[in-house]
Amino acid sequence: MHSTRRHFALRLAQLAATVGLVAGLGLGTAHAQEKKTLVIGATAGSNFDQLKLGIKPVLEKKGYTVKLVEFNDYVQPNLALAQGSLDANLFQHIIYLKKFSADKGLNLTDITKAPIAPLGLYSKKRKSLADVKDGDRITLPNDPSNLARALVFLEQLKLIKVKAGVDPLKATEKDVAENPRKLVLTPIEAAQLPRTLDDAEFALINGNFAISSGLKLTEAVALEKTPDHYLNVVAVKTEDKDKPWARDIAGAFHTPEYRAALDKHFAGYARPAFLQ
């Protein structure tokens, strides 16, 4: 009887020790899993360069290892983010993020605004808007949100007029009510627009792709006065938006170091209010 009790007591002690060890290991594992490596994606050109010159150094000072991934389209960065290949991305405005996420059934969220190189009207054949001729061909981005943005810009330049009552964030080339110069509007994948300058009279090119192709903002025939809803945003998976590392990424865009990088390397970019 006493032997049985002693055996039972010994088993209890062993069990308690095992539970304590497991608990200790669990705490150790949780501590070890604190995220210190970040993978951030961006489209080629100014978006990628902003991360490289202005954000990566700030995060590295906070103890993170930062890997940057470059993309050449507007589809893969969000798919990679949703699939977990990226922790965050920088390449899109909020309208595109919301539409893409809804269309693809993705749970992605913005965590901060960021600067963007303005949309520009470029040409190798015409020097100014005064040189526009009847029938000139203009290429423009074919993704819905940037297509609408480009049409609004052309309307601001008094080259076309969009139908009254059409949502300016959803307009397509079919919504053009007036086109007095009979301009030929040709939607093209955004990344390919710089290549169309040899054939088309004008191309409306997103700033990051213009810069990555060697164009300068100062070379544009006209530059967009970018409204806030077309500023870039940093996106993460919705489930990650309140995690410490996500807050650190967002915080990096608010630092004096990042502002200094913008002032030095990205003059003329449209900026959110907190970076003015």
Image (spheres, rainbow, N blue to C red):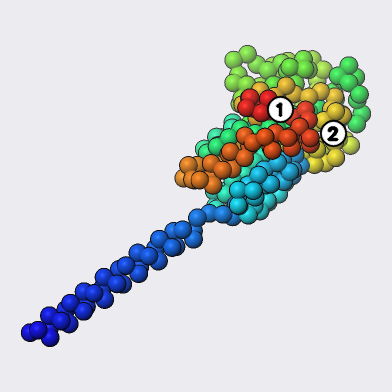
**Which x, y percent locates residue 105?**
50, 43
Q: Quadrant of the N terminus?
A: bottom left
As drawn, which residue projects farthest toward the left? 1
Picture quarter containing residue 172?
A: top right
Q: Is residue 31 above or below residue 157?
A: below
| Front residue (pair 130, 65) | 65
Lateral position of residue 233 relative to residue 156, left or right: left
> Which callout, 2 or 1, points to the residue nearer the camera?
1
Q: Which mark is residue 216?
A: 2
State the residue at coordinates (59%, 15%).
165
Q: Which mark is residue 13?
A: none
State the residue at coordinates (53%, 41%).
247
Q: Which residue is mark 1?
A: 270
| Front residue (pair 164, 123) | 123
Q: Is residue 167 visible?
A: yes
Residues at marks 2 and 1, CA–CA distance in whole angstroms: 15 Å
| Front residue (pair 33, 173) | 33
What amino acid does circle 1 point to? Answer: Ala
**Which x, y percent locates residue 16?**
26, 70
State the residue at coordinates (44%, 59%).
30
Q: Is residue 9 above or below residue 193?
A: below
What amino acid does circle 2 point to? Answer: Lys
Instruction: Find numbered disc 1 in the image and state the secondary structure of the residue it sits on.
Output: loop
**Which x, y percent locates residue 274?**
62, 27
Report crowding for label 2: few under 14, some 14 to 19, many 20 or more residues within 10 A (C-alpha): few
**Which x, y percent locates residue 100?**
57, 38
Report crowding for label 1: few under 14, some 14 to 19, many 20 or more residues within 10 A (C-alpha): many
Lateral position of residue 71 relative to residue 79, left or right: right
Q: Earlier in the sequence, mark 2 or mark 1?
A: 2
